[in-house]
Image (cartoon, coloured by chain):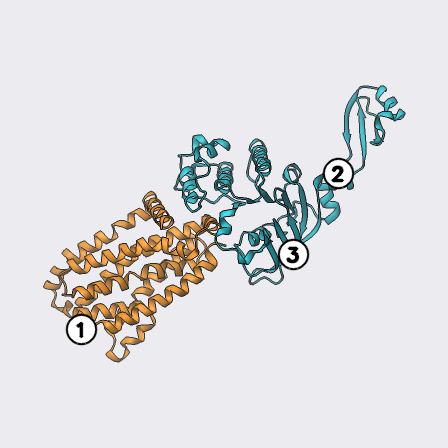
Chain colours: A orange, B cyan
Amino acid sequence: MKKIFKLAFTDFKLIFRDPSLRSFLVLPVILFALIIWAVPPLIEKYAILAPYLSLFLVVGVIEDTQMFSFISSMVLIDEKESDVAKVYGVVPLNKMEYVLSRFLIPYLFTVVLNLVLLSVQTICEVSVLAILLISFLAALVVPVYALAINSMVQNRMQGMVYIKAFNMLVLIPVAAFFVPEKFVHLFGVFPTHWVFQAIDKATQNLSIGLFTVIGFVFFLSLLWWVSRTFVRKHFV
Amino acid sequence: MIQVENLVFQYPGNDGPTLKGLDFSIAKGEIFGFLGPSGAGKSTAQKVLYKILEGYKGQVNIDGKNLSEWNNSYFERIGVGFELPNHYLKLSGKENLELFAAFYTNGKKHNSTELFEMVDLADAMDKPVETYSKGMKMRLNFIRAIQHDPDILFFDEPTSGLDPVNAHKIKQHILNLKNQGKTIFVTTHSMETADGICDRVSFIVDGKLVLTDTPRNLKSSYGKEAVKVDLKNGQSEEFPLKDLGANPQFLEFLKQDEVKRIHTLEATLEEVFIRVTGKSLGDE
């Protein structure tokens, strides 16, 4: 456990000493300000937005996950590019411990961000249980995103391209809100679809059990798969 | 300590193997070197031994136990000095060292300040590594490899990027580690490094070991057991080493003029390498 916290603490040092990463830490503050102060007056003024209230929460929740998705991806890409990753390959640290140490804090931090966002927003009413489930589920985007990118890229330039692509990928299931009912779950091939649908149903006071179960199974399976791919490639 | 038999390794996607059946062993307390040009397979062999590369064929035993049977405790016993500097540039040298020390049971065996003093980096230990020169980063590589007091050390081109003074110091530190009983495996394409520190060297070319022996044996068996005397008047002559002091021609020759230079005619390791392998150490 000491090793895990040592590494997690180092990550924060690296983030705070890199201006490009440090600036990303203000992203949730901007997002919170928009959701709390900017969106409610807009909804009041434009009635046309009423059917899409849950979409504001969908975007808010997914953007919360993007801060650490980006930061963790860049920290690992730098580590790969500078060959520091090779050093982790020859220290007595289990590779899964390594993965855990890199993502436990970002994951929990993202969970907290979503808990706060969903609790303080006034756009829709969401139950406490739904807030908890959605927060824990949505935050799984962080490790899956960063590990997937780092299983594919070798340097910062490639990383930036893939990050752009992944930013779009996670948002694609938003389109499900604009298609006929029978086509909605075609977007289920994207894991974030199940998060979005859970948020939508939660805002309508409907059960989100099925969507969160599918979401957790989907994300945890992906996490298992990308972790193995990452471990195979990162330390060589 | 280390026994390797018929080691074959092929990188995924490559047409053929990089290592083509290596056989060698390294005794406890020995400095063993792989000498060969770039791309010969030196670093690949080390990577197999420090368990970064999997999927090799052949037998690798460490302390009588198959390498694949060693768990994470193996990494407590080894130290790796990588060929190129690899540190967190935003962290100071000391933060880098202490971060990796935290992973070892023995990580605090050495005082970090003393390690920095040992390689003349004490003044820079609190500065970010991004301000270090390549030579300074390589010295940081070196102390990171030894800080947890491992039994087995792997150094990949340990003097690469160092000025002659620091290269000499690092070689002295490696010899001190040998005197402490450490088993050391060095790869290099530097003839001076191999000659200066290795108990035995293997010539490696195209993934195959061509010859293994002590540097002294290699140089004497491929050179002449003779001395060459150059006089200031321009005359030059060779004399066999055997009974040199009683050789009347040699003694007479010395009287002819002031001696400019006397040197033995043993081959350099590089000359032996070229003669044995037909390749130069600078070849790709």
Measure the C-alpha gap from mark 1 to mark 2.
Answer: 86 Å
Labels 3, 1: one chain:
no
SS under mark 1: loop
Subunit bearing disc 2: B
Res. B68 image quadrant: bottom right
* Front position in the image: A235 or A174: A235
* Disc 1: which residue: A206
The label nearer to you, 3 versus 1, is 3
* Front position in the image: B1 or B197: B1
Q: Residue B5: which disc?
A: 3
* Disc 2: which residue: B267
Measure the C-alpha gap from mark 2 to mark 3.
Answer: 30 Å
- Identify residue type, mark 3: Glu
Res. B177 image quadrant: top right
Residue B222 in view in this figure: no
Measure the C-alpha gap from mark 3 to mark 1.
Answer: 66 Å
Residue A180 at x, y percent in the picture: 24, 78
Residue B178 at x, y percent in the picture: 59, 38
* Front position in the image: B25 or B186: B25
Compared with A119, B133 (above or below) is above
Q: Residue B195: which disc?
A: none
Callouts 2 and 3 close, C-beta under 8 Å: no
- Identify residue type, mark 2: Ala
Left/right placement of residue B48 relative to residue B227 reads left
Residue at the (55%, 33%) spot, across then down: B166
- Identify residue type, mark 1: Leu
Subunit bearing disc 1: A
Of the two numbered discs 2 and 3 on the same chain, state the one appearing first in sequence: 3
Graded by Cα atoms within 10 Å as few (under 14), some (14 to 19) or many (20 or more), the crowding at tag 1 reads: few
